Amino acid sequence: MAIEYWMRGPVENIPALLQPVAHALLQAQFEINEIMTAFPESLLWEKPAGAASPGFHLQHISGVQDRLFTYAKAQLLQPDQMDALTAEGKPGATLPALLDRLNQQVSKSLEQLSATDPATLTDFRGVGRKQLPATVMGLLFHAAEHTMRHTGQLLVTVKVLKGQ
């Protein structure tokens, strides 16, 4: 078993206060890619016992990171991000495409973490049309927490679908 990312030391170029975010994103990326290796494409959109499908979790993990990291930059969501949100859970994307999107999003998230000034972590950030109150730190940590929550759900769903 591989050593978990949080026990591997600091991630290069990531501010110390954001190391837990980077560790969580990298751990999720590793576990998702590992469990999805050789996963049958025919099961990608199955919903065992009404649970969310593996395809949904893959779309949602990438989408939530993209949206929360956008808010952390004090930006509003763009139409393509809203379209991606609407498409979450709808079959169509292939497993390789979903994994590629996930891997690209983790890389993009890590780039943003490396460029985040720790002095801005407690700065106000509005979320959504209502501009609900958050902070840079709150958004980045929630992105990591939400990623891990759905990673856990994905891992269980995949095992159920594979009959393990």
Image (cartoon, helix red, strand yellow):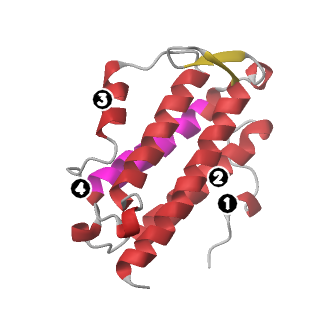
Label 3 residue SS: helix
Mark 2 is on which residue type?
A: Ala
Specify whether residue 88 is painted magenta.
no
Q: Residues within 10 Å of mark 1 (few under 14, many from 20)?
A: some
Residue with the mark numbered 2: 24
Q: Residue at x 52, y 19 (%)?
A: 128
Q: CA distance from mark 3 to mark 4?
A: 17 Å
Q: CA distance from mark 4 to mark 1?
A: 28 Å
- Per the rendered image, the range of residues in magenta is 96-112
For marks 4 and 2 on the same chain, the one whose residue lies earlier in the sequence = 2
Specify whether residue 106 is painted magenta.
yes
For marks 3 and 4 on the same chain, the one whose residue lies earlier in the sequence = 3
Residue with the mark numbered 1: 5
Residue with the mark numbered 3: 83
Label 4 residue SS: loop
Quarter of the image for the N terminus: give it: bottom right
Quadrant of the rendered structure where residue 131 is?
A: top right
Say whether marks 1 and 2 touch (CB < 8 Å): yes
Quadrant of the rendered structure where residue 104 is?
A: top left
Q: CA distance from mark 3 to mark 1?
A: 32 Å
Residue with the mark numbered 4: 94
For marks 2 and 3 on the same chain, the one whose residue lies earlier in the sequence = 2
Mark 4 is on which residue type?
A: Thr
Measured from the top left, where is residue 149 in percent x and y? 59, 54
